[in-house]
Image: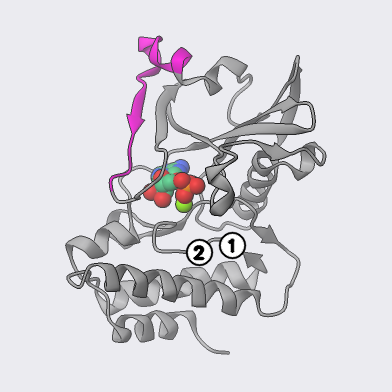
Amino acid sequence: MDSLEFKHYGNDIVAYNKSLFSEFQVDLFCPEFLSSNPSLHYERLLPSDIKGRQGLHLFTYHGQQLVLRHYYRGGAIAKFIRDSYLWCGLHRTRAIGELQTLCTLRQLDLPVPAPVAARVRKEGLTYRADIVTRLIPETQSLSFRLTENPLSADTWRRIGAVIRRFHDHNCNHADLNAHNVLLGEEETVYLVDFDRARVGKSARGAAQRNLSRLQRSLSKLKEREPSFHYSGQDFRSFLEGYGTD
Ligand SMILES: Nc1ncnc2c1ncn2[C@@H]1O[C@H](COP(=O)(O)OP(=O)(O)O)[C@@H](O)[C@H]1O
Ligand SMILES: [Mg+2]
């Protein structure tokens, strides 16, 4: 079972999953360190289907492929503040929140990346943060898949059924869009990006808002690119899989 260990290095706080690694040094959050160590097989990943994203850092540590992601501000504020957030206590930081959410979701046996580690760098009243998860290999985002080919009705139903399982556990994904649904071999469905997600607290209307957000994201991609393989019938198949009871 995942369990987190916390370590302090000056202004840096590192939390890591001690069921996966007996130690996780603070340097592993530093892309320059990763790229200067050939044994870590560092690779910069620029997900070509995600416009405006900063990319991810992929590396191998003790035989496991890991993904490092820095937290960047989104929305209008991003023009002024790139990556710092107001400090309201360690457990309210983006990175620790997401790491803990992933631990909870894995315990519930839901298909999410394994949580590996997080670093929070405190700078006065603000902080910057990073997270490391285990790579789910051989996956493509739903958004990318639909630029290439349509999906079968069965795959749409399968995506609906998986999202329903999250909702049955009161998991409210704060940003359920077509980039955060991944499809793996044999159309296995995973969800990623649990920044600001909540689990276990029922919030009225949250599930419906999640579904509407996903539908909007798909419609927006279709508007932008008419050859995008998505139709109203696909969403009906999705809802069939999600179920109504
Ligand atoms: N652990 C992982 N395994 C496989 N792919 C991942 C993993 N983490 C992220 N990705 C890929 O990188 C993309 C960006 O990561 P995400 O966590 O959604 O961050 P953000 O949307 O904030 O940039 C995802 O849509 C997914 O395609
Ligand atoms: Mg995302």
In reply to whether residue 47 is colored magenta, the answer given is yes
What residue type is disc 1 on?
Answer: His
Q: Is mark 2 within 8 Å of ligand 2?
A: no
Q: Which residue is mark 2?
A: 176
Residue range of the region highlighted in magenta in the rendering: 32-48
Mark 2 and mark 1 in contact? Answer it, CB < 8 Å: yes
**Judging from the image, what secondary structure is the residue with disc 1 in?**
loop
How many tags in the picture? 2
Question: Image point 46% across, 74% down: which residue?
Answer: 161
Residue 203's mark? none
Looking at the figure, which quarter contains the N terminus? top right
Residue 200 rendering spot, x and y as whole percentages: 73, 64
What residue type is disc 2 on?
Answer: Leu
Would residue 198 be found to the left or right of residue 27 on screen? right
Question: Image point 71% across, 34% down: which residue?
Answer: 4
Looking at the figure, which quarter contains the C terminus? bottom right
> Quick check: can you spot residue 25?
no
> Quick check: can you spot residue 16?
yes
Viewer-proximal residue among 129 and 240: 129
56 in relation to 40, above or below? below
Residue 112 rendering spot, x and y as whole percentages: 51, 52
> Residue placed farthest to the front in the image?
80
209 in relation to 64, above or below? below
How far apart, in angstroms, are the residues tagged by discs 2 and 1? 6 Å
Residue 173's mark? 1
